[in-house]
Image (spheres, helix red, strand yellow):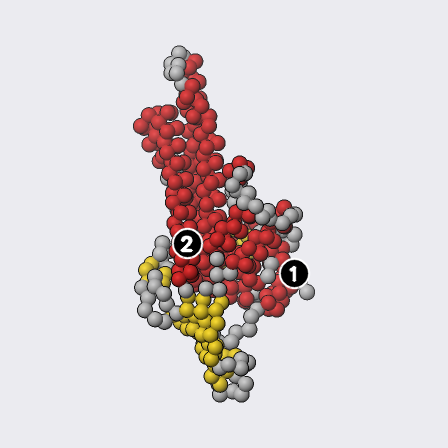
Amino acid sequence: MTRHQEIRSFFALNAHEGTGVIHAGVGPMALSGDRHGQDIVAGLAPCLSFVLVRHAPREMLRAFRSGSTVILEFYWPAAEAGVFLRCRIELNSKDQWRLRHRRHAHQAANQQSSQLAILAMTLLLAVCGWIVGGAEGMQRALMGSTPRPDETVISRESMYRWFGARPLSPVEVPDLFAILAKVCSRAGLVRLPDLYCLPAPRDMNAYALGGPDRSAIVLTEGLLRGMTRDEIAGILAHEVAHIRNNDAWTMGWATALRRAIDWTSLAGLALLRTSQHHGGMTSSRPLTMLLSAAPTLGQLLGLALSRVREMDADATALELTGDSRALIAALDKLERHHTGSAPSRTPAFAHDPARLLRSHPATSERVGTLLNLAY
C-alpha cells in the first residue's frame, strides 16, 4: 500500500456514518452581518434537528442539559422496523450568549491591535522619511510601501517548485474535502482552497496561501498521519481563517513596511553621517538613535502583528468548528512534535520577554485563550 493510499484509508476509517441529519433554526431572531458577511443570531433562538436512529431510549420524550444548553428530544417510530425519527430541540441559555459576546469582543480587540500595529509601522516609516527628505521624503517613503494586490501564483507547477507539494483530489481523499467544504461553508468562502500534500512524513505542519478569491492549503504527510479527523478539521479551520481574514495580504503589507523602514533608516543614517562630516546637523544624536532603532522597532511590530493574526485565526477556527478540545489537542501534538515536550501549563506570555521575538504566540497562551472563549 502506498503512502497516499494509507492516507486515504485513514480518512475512510475515521469517517462518521451519515444518518440524514437536518438542522434548522426556528423562532424569532434578528440577523446582522458581521465583518465577513456572515449571519449572526442576535436573539435567543432554538435549534431544531431531525435524524433517523436505530435505537431509541425507553422514554420517548426526554429533557436534559448539556453544559449551558437545554435539550428536548422526541422519538417517533419510522416505517422501517427498529428505526426511529428523533426530533431534537436545543435551547441555548444566556451563558452561551455571553460566550458569543466574549468571542466577538476578542475578535474586535484583535482587529484593533492589528490596525494599531500597521499604524505604528506607518508612522515610524513617515518619521524616517521626514528625517531623510522632509515632507517630500516622507511622501516618497510612504508611496513605496503602499499595499499591493496579492500576486501569489498558485498553480501545480509553482507549488511543486516552491514546496515540492503535489495536489490532492476529492477522488483520492473525499473525506478530507468534505471537512474542508463544511468549514469553508461556515466561513462564507465561495471558492474552496486547493489542497496540497507535502511529502514530509516526519514533519507536522500546515500552510495557507492566498486570499478569499484564490487560495491553497499545504498539509504535510506527517500531519495527515499523526492527527485525528477532528484535529485535522481544527487545523483546516485555522488555515481557512487565515484565508478568510486575508492575512497573507496583511502580512505582505507589514513586510513591505518593514523593508521600507530598513532602507529609509539606512539612508537617513548615511545622510546624517555625511552632514556631520561637513559640519551640519551637529545636534543629531536623537535622530541617529531613532534611525538606528527603527529597523528593530519595525521588526518587533511585525512580529506582534503576526501573533495577533494567529490568535485571531485560532478564535475563528473555534467559531467554525465549535470543537475546542480538538483544537487544543492539535496544538498539544504540534508542540510535542516541534519541541519534544508538552506545552507549559503556566501563562508564559505574562512574564516572558522572549515572546516579543516570536511570530506565533506560546502554545500555553493559545490554549488559555481557547479555553476562555470556549467556556
Name the foreground residue: 343 vs 17: 343
Name the foreground residue: 189 vs 41: 41
Name the foreground residue: 150 vs 337: 337
Residue visible at 52% across and 47% down in the picture: 365
Could you say where residue 367 lies in the image, as x and y percent from the top left? 53, 51
Q: Amino acid at mark 2?
A: Arg
Give the mark toward the camera: 1 or 2.
Answer: 2
* Disc sitting over residue 64 in the figure: none
Question: Would you call the spot at circle 1 few (<14 residues within 10 Å), some (14-19), or many (20 or more)?
Answer: few
Residue receiving disc 1:
3
Quarter where residue 82 is shown = bottom right
Residue receiving disc 2:
102
Q: Is residue 90 above or below residue 207?
A: below
Q: Is residue 190 above or below residue 150?
A: below
Question: What SS does tag 1 mark?
Answer: helix
Distance from disc 1 to disc 2, alpha carbons, whole Å, reads 43 Å
Question: What SS does tag 2 mark?
Answer: helix
Q: Amino acid at mark 1?
A: Arg
Residue visible at 34% across and 61% down in the picture: 42
Could you say where residue 97 lies in the image, as x and y percent from the top left? 39, 60
Residue visible at 38% across and 49% down in the picture: 108
